[in-house]
């Protein structure tokens, strides 16, 4: 069946944060992303493909799960797609809301919390990095970009379906809860006296990273247990926030 | 003095790789970037600012070095600027060409070589990461994006002025030269049996990373001494290439 005009508008509305909040859905583009979402048992609501792609192998498993698959014209695809060169497929996926309490339950060892990370590429890479190192969740404070923004979704690869992300948090309050649950609150700070290699992580670690321009906010600093520095031997003023996260999470993983 | 029409066109030509090759200059936008370039003694050729910015403090040091500073109209600025919201300053900087032999000279311990890294943001972040860890240089194979592309320049922060970058290399041949000079050729490979924490780097390390989609090419693999894996405890299919570089360079730095 072909997407109706009303359905095209429903898809389009999901590029805006308010549209996603109302519908409870977000959009996923491209064959790789769709396959990864299927493999991760993501709650795919519907799929729209260009007519010539209707018989693609990648759709078989999704069809079997009873997900409705519609076709759409090149013109409607251009209207819906956020990419310059659409691969001819776009899916609506239900947003699964997670609660902070889930992430603090016994057994979870590692959390990543982000304070004011407004760059979508960085946020997506951070979620992917947290996924690689088996973090139990990602906490986003109010200044962060929406995790279902299309650029974030693209940069996460499928990690958005592997790691629970809780957004729009009052971060100091959430971190106080994490602290009560036994998490050590750790920040990265180039000026810190403790260096990464001498730091022995506690049983439960919540790593907090801020924006590259501003670092973590004063209210987060107040409840920090440990500040660690990644030693520098060159001249760069700072490390990219996702690179810093990778280095620290790899250290936690080893220790 | 105001930029002439011909000068405006000279600036504009530098957004294209061929234009940069002909003039031997590239463009730098924004006050932070200009200040960092000044601090790094970068060979700034000329600066163009919007008339209302002509007395900015940041220009004093540059003026003192005898660099010509012109004004330009908002309209010309829009024509020249690659950013949506220009800060009102744009500079031409001379491209310093480096030779591979420089990077192989005794004393340099660490090189980063990149094979087919076509994403400008990733390349910029990689150069910045190499700078943080004091790498003696960055080698770029033929499939990499041009390091003087505006998105790369923005993502490097000022690291392009700290770390020599040699581009358009025949990478297998360059790495054979590095090997002859005593560098151990190391690649990252999720399937490798040796893991990062058990690997003791040699005195001289050349770390080679490929694109996220394709990894390093077969001809580079052939001359590799060691393949190492960054252990994964989660479900992400891969790490971002700059994150992987950060984790490995941090390990080399410590050992």
Image (tube, coloured by chain):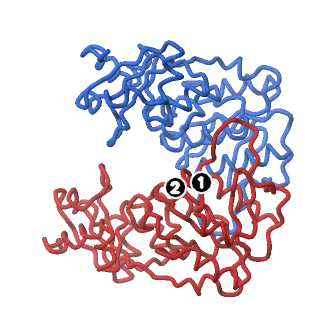
Chain colours: A blue, B red
Q: Position of residue B194 (x, y in %)?
A: 81, 57
Q: Quadrant of residue A173?
A: top right
The answer to whether A196 is drawn above or below residue A36 in the figure is below
Identified at 50% across, 19% down, the residue is: A44
Q: Mark 2 — on which chain does it sit?
A: B
Q: Which residue is label 1 attached to?
A: B241
Quadrant (top left/top right/bottom left/bottom right) for the N terminus of chain A: top left
Extreme residue in the left direction: B5
Q: Position of residue B199 (x, y in %)?
A: 82, 62
Q: Mark 1 or mark 2, which is nearer the start of the sequence?
A: 2
Q: Quadrant of residue A128?
A: top right
Identified at 56% across, 60% down, the residue is: B126
Q: Nearer the viewer, residue B174 or A202?
A: B174
Q: Which residue is label 2 attached to?
A: B122
B252 vs B169, left or right, is right
Identified at 66% across, 46% down, the residue is: A245
10 Å neighbourhood of mark 2: few (<14), some, or many (≥20)?
many
Q: Mark 1 — on which chain does it sit?
A: B
Identify the element where label 1 is drawn.
Answer: helix
Q: Position of residue B36 (x, y in %)?
A: 48, 67
B91 vs B182, left or right, is left
Identified at 61% across, 61% down, the residue is: B209
| Tag 2 near tag 1, CB within 8 Å | yes
| Gap in angstroms between the C-alphas marked 2 and 1 | 7 Å
Q: Nearer the viewer, residue B166 or B135?
A: B166
The answer to whether A84 is drawn above or below residue B255 in the figure is above
10 Å neighbourhood of mark 1: few (<14), some, or many (≥20)?
many
Identify the element where label 2 is drawn.
Answer: helix
Q: Nearer the viewer, residue A77 or A146?
A: A77
Q: Position of residue A100 (x, y in %)?
A: 67, 20
Quadrant (top left/top right/bottom left/bottom right) for the C terminus of chain A: top right
């Amino acid at each position: 069946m072909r997407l109706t005009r009303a359905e095209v508008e429903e898809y389009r509305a999901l590029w805006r944060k308010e549209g996603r909040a109302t519908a409870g859905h977000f959009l996923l583009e491209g064959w790789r992303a769709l396959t990864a979402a299927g493999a991760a048992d993501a709650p795919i609501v519907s799929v729209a493909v260009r007519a010539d792609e209707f018989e693609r192998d990648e759709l078989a498993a999704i069809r079997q799960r009873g997900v409705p698959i519609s076709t759409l014209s090149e013109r409607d695809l251009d209207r819906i797609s956020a990419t310059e060169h659409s691969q001819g497929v776009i899916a609506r996926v239900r947003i699964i809301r997670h609660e902070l309490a889930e992430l603090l339950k016994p057994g979870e060892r590692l959390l990543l919390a982000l304070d004011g990370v407004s760059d979508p590429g960085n946020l997506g890479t951070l979620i992917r990095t947290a996924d690689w190192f088996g973090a139990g969740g990602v906490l986003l404070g109010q200044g962060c970009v929406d995790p279902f923004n299309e650029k974030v979704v693209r940069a996460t690869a499928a990690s958005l379906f592997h790691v629970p992300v809780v957004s729009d948090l009052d971060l100091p309050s959430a971190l106080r809860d994490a602290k009560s649950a036994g998490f050590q609150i750790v920040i990265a700070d180039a000026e810190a006296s403790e260096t990464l290699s001498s730091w022995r992580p506690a049983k439960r670690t919540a790593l907090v990273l801020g924006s590259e321009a501003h670092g973590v906010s004063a209210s987060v600093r107040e409840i920090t247990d440990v500040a660690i520095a990644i030693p520098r031997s060159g001249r760069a003023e700072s490390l990219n926030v996702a690179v810093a996260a990778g280095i620290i999470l790899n250290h936690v993983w080893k220790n």
